[in-house]
Amino acid sequence: MARPVYEIDLQAFWEDPYPDLARLRVEAPVAYVPQLDAVLISRRDDIFREEKRTDVFSSDQPEGLMTRLMGQNMMRKDGADHMAERKAIFPAVSPKTVKQHWLAQFRAATTQVLQDLAPRGRCDLVRDFAMPVSAEALKAVTGLTRMRADEMDAVSQGMIDGCANYAGDAAVEARCHDSTRLIDDHISTMWEAGSGAGAFSLLRVQQKAGLPESLIRANIKLAISGGQNEPRDAIAGTVWALLQHPEQLQDVRSGRATWMQAFEEYARWMSPIGMSPRRVAQPYGLNGVALQPEDRVFLMFGSGNRDERVFARPDRYDLHQDISAAISFGAGPHFCAGAWISRALIAEAALPMLFERMPDLSLEGPARFGGWAFRGPLEVPVKWGLVN
């Protein structure tokens, strides 16, 4: 059959993609969206199954935005090439390294951010807490320890905006190029031994594995593109969700639920990583829709995580529901390599330490959200202590 066509309003989709995604799941689960020049796959089970078929849905996208703007990193490779680079970075991101090496550093950095923040009595949780906590962790993990937290946040945002720039905005592309140049400058500064990059950093473990310099640089940019905004947005977003649902916050505080449940339910519900692109490598039929070589396909994780066929209360934040089928970190060979770092940073450092230091934390105004390829809060105003 001819592939269905579904029209969207790009601004409305950026502000809130979920109404369109719900319609797509029901009316056209495999549909071409001309405003994105891509075929969107929106049902969870289709995404989970098809992502593993790398012979059809290839991550190798020579003309894709990420490859053109950041270089060909391991996320844009399949098979042996992908696995070789994944193996090279594993010593930096393994569960053992996270537990024995990174977690203590995450907690120390979070302690310092909270110490600086506590006297203020109010803040924007995104800018003033989640951003520096995420950035300080990423500085250590990448090895770019001389970069300021606000620089790390800015270059990450510049790259993810560039990678989602399907409208072809020249100003967005220019900011992305500025971001990659700044990262390259910091990599060059930290390249030699003795510069301050830790032995378990992505820079050092890739050097030890003997990867070419071009790949090391591309993979560090990849880590920054996702390793800053996603934890930042998940930290601030989970806090907002818990403050919006005080009974669930109390369940966590009393031990009836865990901080990990709170985070993972938020990651399902709001999906900081909303989409992953693929290139069709050979003719293929999916649910009766014909796909042709070089078609661009978007695996819509944010839609799959709200699939009413899979989740009991898909549009509600409910940390007690079964979310074992969530695809927040992807599926198959491209499962997020930084998942263990994110879980430790958010659920074992940022969330418990914030609520312990500021037990009377409360919202001081509405939160604003945006994005569909990457989605998160733009600001979350909060207060604590004696502020009225």
Image: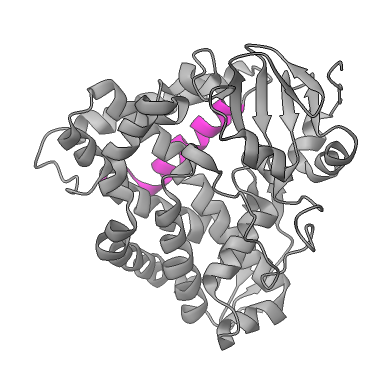
Left or right: 66, with 248 as reference point? left
What x and y, as percent, mark residue 204? 19, 40
- Residue at image location 17% in from the left, 48% down from the top: 199
Overall secondary structure of the magenta section: helix
Quarter residue 31 falls in:
top right
- Residue at image location 83% in from the left, 40% down from the top: 25
- Residue at image location 62% in from the left, 12% down from the top: 294
Residue 144 in view, yes or no: no
Please say whether residue 279 is one of the residues in the magenta stretch: no
Residue range in magenta is 144-164
Instruction: Identify which residue, 85 or 72, lies in the foreground.
Output: 85
| Outermost residue, left side | 194
On the rendered image, what quadrant is the C terminus found in? bottom right
Total marks placed: 0
What x and y, as percent, mark residue 142? 30, 43
Left or right: 262, with 284 as reference point? left
Answer above or below: position of 57 versus 91: above
What x and y, as percent, mark residue 387? 61, 78
Left or right: 177, with 64 as reference point? left
Instruction: Identify which residue, 48 or 154, lies in the foreground.
Output: 48
Residue 206 in view, yes or no: yes
- Colouring mode (rainbow / by chain / secondary structure / one colour): one colour
| Outermost residue, right side | 27
Please say whether residue 146 is one of the residues in the magenta stretch: yes
What x and y, as percent, mark residue 150? 42, 45
Answer above or below: position of 282 versus 126: above
On the rendered image, what quadrant is the N terminus found in? top right
- Residue at image location 39% in from the left, 32% down from the top: 221
